[in-house]
Image: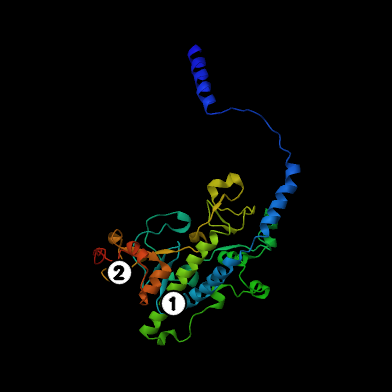
Amino acid sequence: MALRGKLWHCFLDEASGFAIYARFYSVKVDLKKLRPMILKRIENRAKEYPISSMIPVAQDVLKARSLLIQGVSTLMNVFPVMACKFCPEVYIGEQGHLIQTCYGYKRRSKNQVHEWISGSLNDILVPVETFHLQKMFQDVIKHHQRFDFDRVPAVFELCLQAGADLDEENLSSSSWKSESTFSGVHGTKSLSPDELKFIATGTLRAWEVLRSGIRRLLLVYPAKVCKYCSEVHVGPSGHKARLCGVFKYESWRGAHFWEKADVDDLVPPKIVWRQRPQDPPVLVNEGRDFYGHAPAVVDLCTKAGAIAPARYHSMMKVQGLPGPTGVKS
């Protein structure tokens, strides 16, 4: 005890030379008195939005989204898309691969061969919906209010909050539904390789503009994603609708655990296996360490002749070694 007291006095002597003081106190805060001040600050903050410099970015994102849906729909009429019947796996080609990565219905089995069916636009451009807010800074949506708000694409909601010009008629209609509006260019089968390459290049450019624009908007406008499921909320705070479907967290009654959202949460890249020129006609399980990957949009556009950006080359393994040539008999 004497040694401890001596060390404590030495520490106080040293600290006094730097004017360091310890202060212990307890303050009771009356939240009822602070509430008007907090609401006033939120109201003043809302006056700063939308930011005028970000309105053109939001407009470009909406245009790029429309061009992307149009281009992908057109290319899908030429290049078939296959989707697994029991898991979200997607493959772009005449027939699916034989790589054993299917985890089955409700993950009851693992490392199985996929059962392929014809894919749709939503298999390439994964729809991500969120609640549409009347204004950016509004009261948090309660669980019993979940049916009082429309569900719209998350990119759509982000651009609306960023000041994109869109009338209420288009918002309330089904015009933003990807599959119901865009069916691709008519007469796609008669397009020449040069025309397909032109469409693929424009589609890939729209994909890059869409993602870069969303990345810029997320630096200014808040968006949340659930830590345990794919639910997205565009706004300063997440909603309180108990919709989380992760069963291991049932004790939380379906409440979401919100964290900051990224561009991949609003526009999932949907990574697929990619067949390179040096690969066999059908990808087999023995060569899964050799094959490359790519976002589904990038793979679809490159098959039509577009040149992929350099940042995807390492993922695509463009110059990688070929895998096995076929299935063992």
Identified by mark 1, the residue type is: Gly
Q: Position of residue 90 (x, y in %)?
A: 42, 66
Residue 272 higher or lower than 27, as above or below: below
Mark 1 or 2: in front is: 1
Residue 116 seen in the current view = no
How dense is the environment of label 2, judged by Cα within 10 Å: few (below 14), some, or many (20 and up)? many
Q: Evaluate if marks 1 and 2 touch, with contact meaning CB atoms under 8 Å apart.
A: no
Q: Position of residue 99 (x, y in %)?
A: 34, 62
Residue 280 seen in the current view = yes
Q: Quadrant of residue 62?
A: bottom right
Q: Nearer the viewer, residue 48 or 34?
A: 48
Q: Earlier in the sequence, mark 1 or mark 2?
A: 1
Q: Relative to 137, is 158 on the left or the right?
A: left
- Look at 41% across and 76% down and name the residue there: 201
Identified by mark 2, the residue type is: Arg
Q: Secondary structure at mark 1?
A: helix
Residue 166 higher or lower than 99, as above or below: below
Q: Position of residue 13 (x, y in %)?
A: 52, 21
Display coloring: rainbow
Q: Secondary structure at mark 2?
A: loop
How dense is the environment of label 1, judged by Cα within 10 Å: few (below 14), some, or many (20 and up)? some
Q: Quadrant of residue 286?
A: bottom left
Q: Quadrant of the C terminus?
A: bottom left
- Determine which residue is flagged by label 1: 202
Residue 159, label in figure: none
- Determine which residue is flagged by label 2: 276
Q: CA distance from mark 1 to mark 2?
A: 22 Å
- Look at 53% across and 46% down and name the residue there: 248
Residue 37 higher or lower than 190, as above or below: above
Q: Residue furthest front?
A: 17
- Look at 45% across and 54% down and name the residue there: 107
